[in-house]
Every structure is written in C-alpha cells, then in structure tokens.
Image: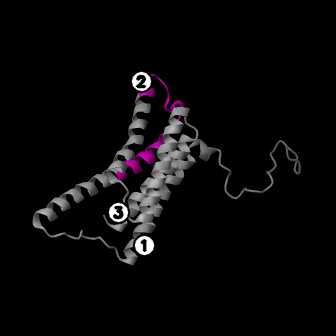
Amino acid sequence: MTPISRLWLAFSAIGAGTIHLAVGASAPVLLMITLVGLGAAELGWGAVTLVRGRALAPRAALFGALIPVFIWGAVATLGSGLGVPAAATGLPLQPMATATLFDLFLACSLALVLRRTRRTTSTSTTEGVPRASAGETAGGWRFLAALTLAALVVSGLTTPALAATDAGAHAVPHGSHGLPLAPTPDAPAGHHH
C-alpha cells in the first residue's frame, strides 16, 4: 500500500468517525452508544494509520467500515416499514449519506489492497523472489498534492455533514464567541434579556 493510499484511507476513516460522533450525540440511546463507539473506533483507526504508516488490521477495518452502513440501512428500512419518518429515527440523511460514502470508499479500498496483497504474496512465493510493489514511495510534491487534495475533499464533505446534525444546528456561530448579544427588534437598544 502506498503512502498516498494510506493517507486517503486514514482521512476517510477520520471523516466518517467525526460524522458518526456528531450524529450519535443526538441519536436514540442504543444508536447513540453504537454510533459513538464506531465513530471513536474510526477516529482511532485513522489516527493510528497516519502515525504508524500502515493500515492496522485491514480485514477487521474492512468489516468495521461496513457496520455503520448496515446499521443505517437497517434503521432506515425498519423505520420506513413501520411508518416512522426518517427524521424520527435520529439519523439525518445528509450526514449519514456522507459517512456511508466514506465508509464504502474505505471498505472498497481495503478490499482491493487485501486482494492485491494476496495476489502479490502468492506470485512472489511461486517465483521465490520478493517483489516491491509499484509506487511504494511517493515524491515529496506528489505526496503534498495528495495530502492537500485529501484534506480538501474530506473537509469539503465533512463540514456540511456536521452542520446538518443536531450538534451543528446548536453550534455557536463563528465569530460570535464572547461578543455581546445583538439587540432584537423587540428590545430597545442597550437592553439585553
């Protein structure tokens, strides 16, 4: 696996984990526990992958990336079958769709890496000569470009998804920390209620 591949996998896990934590914060209790646990695991896996420079337990991570996808599908299917509107399930559409996109990218990428690793291992053992995978090292500018692009894509998808959660809806607007409240049309200027 190339450093750029690991970078994209780690960033997608961190994006999905952040969204799952935000959605889990306002979900019903059982979903809250599940989503917060999965979100923490995704954040941890992404951070460890960045720090160690290799994907930790790729088979388990592939399976773990699909768990929130199946949970969201089950909740949406069962909820709609029982006549429960999507908003009442506690899982907002846009954030969960974005997290699912990250998780599916992660699972598909890990599946391809595992398949390639299995194929490379079987080929190198039959020939008796270990092979270096193509593109194992990335040049500085190429890596920097991939890092920048990954950060832009993940933050560009994650930020609106976080804003669409209950946590995002109750966030303090930027630039208003520590400032006095603006007067409302009903209150006289200079009086804060």
Position of residue 58 measured from the top left corner of the image (x, y, whole percent): 33, 53
Q: Earlier in the sequence, mark 3 or mark 1?
A: 3
Three-letter residue code for mark 1:
Leu
Toward the top, the furthest residue is 82
Q: Earlier in the sequence, mark 3 or mark 2?
A: 3
Can residue 28 be seen here? The reply is no
Spatial CA span between label 2 and label 1:
47 Å
Find residue 19 and name its label: none
Q: Residue 175's image quarter?
A: bottom right
Q: Are marks 3 and 2 in contact (CB under 8 Å)?
A: no
Q: Which mark is residue 81?
A: 2
Secondary structure at numbered mark 3: helix
Instruction: Kindly identify which residue carries mark 1.
Output: 144
Query: What residue is disc 3 on?
Result: 5
Q: Quadrant of the N terminus?
A: bottom left
Label 2 vs 1, first from the N-terminus: 2
Q: Residues within 10 Å of mark 1 (few under 14, many from 20)?
A: few
**Element on which disc 2 rests:** helix
Number of marks present in the image shown:
3
- Residue density around tag 2, few if under 14, some if 14–19, many if 20 or more, within 10 Å: few
- Residue shown at the point (28%, 57%) measured from the top left: 113
Seen at 49% across and 47% down, the residue is 39
Q: The disc labelled 2 sits on which kind of residue? A: Gly
Q: Is residue 77 left or right of residue 30?
A: left
User: Is 93 contained in the magenta span?
Assistant: yes
* Most common secondary structure along the magenta stretch: helix
Number of the front mark, 3 or 1: 3
